[in-house]
Image: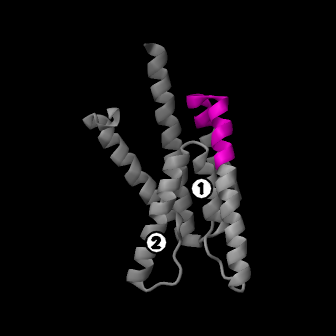
Amino acid sequence: MGEMAGFDVMQMLMTCAVAVLAVVAAWIDARERRFPNGLALVLASVCAVYCLLMFGVGCLVLHAAFSAITCGTLVGFEMLWRRSHKGAPGIGIGDIKFLGGFMLAWPFAALASFALGLLGLAVAGAALKQKSLPLLPFVVGAAGMLLLVERAGMQSGLSAM
């Protein structure tokens, strides 16, 4: 029983660490329109350790492969976009780095947050008549929303379905 409580505490601490790193990333992106490499490395490391501790090596390898394939594809599309649009950026490489790190712990939640963040960005851009806005605040907001929905579902017993 004590071992299980330790597992829950570790899971909570690791999740909080990722949440803090994500908020810092969103803050920096909102202010400076960038995602620093050092922060990307720390986020990816914490997410990898979380996956390793919670699910084991096999799961980490699977998540890493899924992350590499997804992010590699996005980088390829970004390069094609920039080539066909005279260097104009689409999705920034920092946004892809964030997704790659986040996917190491929760690949499907990361993709859902990214998709919802892109949707939120499009709506906000249209409403504010802005050509460009930072993406990470929208992605982190979507991830927080998904976490709250998941926790509410777990407390109501919906996750057992």
Which numbered tag is attached to residue 121? 2
Q: Is residue 90 above or below residue 96?
A: below
Res. 155 image quadrant: top left
Q: Amino acid at mark 1?
A: Leu
The magenta stretch spans residue 58:
yes
Nearer to me, 106 or 9: 106
The N terminus lies in quadrant = top left
Residue position marked by numbered label 1 in the rendering: 99
Q: Is residue 35 visible?
A: no
Horizontal and vertical percent position of residue 26 = 52, 61
Whether the residues at callouts 1 and 2 have beta carbons within 8 Å, the answer is no
Residue 135 falls left or right of residue 123: right
Helix, strand or loop status at disc 2: helix
Residue 32 visible to an observer of this rendering: yes
Q: Nearer the viewer, residue 37 or 58?
A: 58
- The residue range painted magenta reads 49-66
* Three-letter residue code for mark 2: Leu
Mark with earlier residue (1, 2): 1
- Is 84 situated above or below 55? below
Q: Main secondary structure of the magenta part?
A: helix
> Which element is circle 1 on?
helix
Among the 4 quarters of the image, the one containing residue 38 = bottom right
Q: Is residue 142 above or below residue 154?
A: below
Whole-percent x, y for residue 11 in the image: 49, 32
Question: What crowding class fits label 1: few (fewer than 14 Cα within 10 Å), some (14-19), or many (20 or more)?
Answer: many
Which one is in front, 138 or 110?
110
For image coordinates 71% across by 83% down, the residue present is 84
- Residue 61: x and y in percent read 68, 37
